[in-house]
Amino acid sequence: MTLQRVIIHPGFHKTGTSSVQRALRTCRADLAPLWQIGLEEDFPDAAAAARAYSLRRDPLDLGLFQQALADWIETLELAGTEGLLLSCESLMGEIPGPPGGARDYSAGPDLAVALVEVLRAAFGSNIAVTLHLSTRDSADWLESLHWQLVRGGLVDERFGAFARRMRGHTDLGAQARAIAAAVAAVPVQIAPLEEMTGPEGPLGPLLDLMGWPAAQRQAFQAMPRVNARPPHVDRLHLANRFARINRRVEGREAAKAVKQRMMARIWARARRTRAPNEEQA
């Protein structure tokens, strides 16, 4: 059997991608040998070059991206493999939002074209390539993005200021369509997170693309969400508190420690609240 298909899941950030990658990381053995999985830790140099290109738009970074990806592909043992699935948000560039960084995925079309070129050079012009782009409602995505950035210490703005700065850059559907137009000869599936309601969550559309049998999907079901926040918490208020910590606490590691202690207290309170409710149920 020779490699027949490549599926690329290059994001976007904050659209269930971390949950997808956790599931793929956990279940690699269940998918082998028919499918091999490539995640960011498998091709870190290619991911870094893609992020650099999204920030600088230097053709050298685009060339480094292609070379690093080609070098990684050469290391693969593909005997008995039918398909290759890559899931990595960095393939479309840096996470948007940090001051002075990327605001959107406008580098995505160039990176998608470069990626497809590498795959065709490596596997032949007849290799079946599909892009799967996960999107999200603009308002929900922006709020989730702000939370991710304040949690990581990359932003110290309250949500309102952040939203004003990001205005005009939050339509993931439009950005996905621009990428699809750039690789017009390649099928592109655009999947809103809000529609991923099946038992496999955001991994479901990828399993569908892979043709993975429904009877063999139990291992992918009921996995906990990644990057979940405590329940029954005013999420916007919590994000703004984190932003204030980032402004007031000197040093990123020191601010991180303060936020970790705060989160530990909030989770402990959530568990104490849940336990009596479960006893009464």
Image (spheres, rainbow, N blue to C red):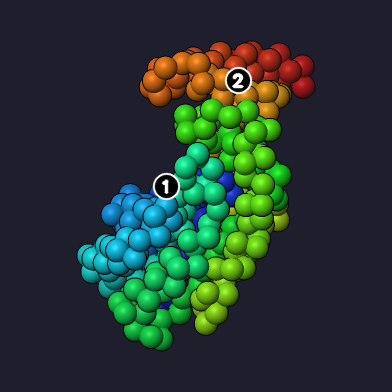
| Quadrant position of residue 125 | bottom left
Q: Residue at x 58, y 40 (%)?
A: 145
* Amino acid of disc 2: Arg
Label 2 element class: helix
Q: Residue at x 29, y 63 (%)?
A: 60
- Residue 3, visible in the rendered structure: no
Q: If the image is split into quadrants, where does the C terminus sit?
A: top right
x, y percentage for residue 126? 41, 86
Residue found farthest to the bottom: 126
Label 2, label 1: how far apart the Cα atoms are: 34 Å
As drawn, the label of residue 26 is: 1
Q: Is residue 103 visible?
A: yes
Side of 256 where 104 appears, left or right = right
Where residue 247 sits in the image (x, y, percent)?
Answer: 51, 21
Q: Which residue is mark 2?
A: 241
Task: Answer with mark 2 or mark 1, whichever residue precedes in sequence.
Answer: 1
Residue 126 position (above or below residue 195): below
> 179 left or right of 256?
right
For badge 1, the amino acid type reads: Thr
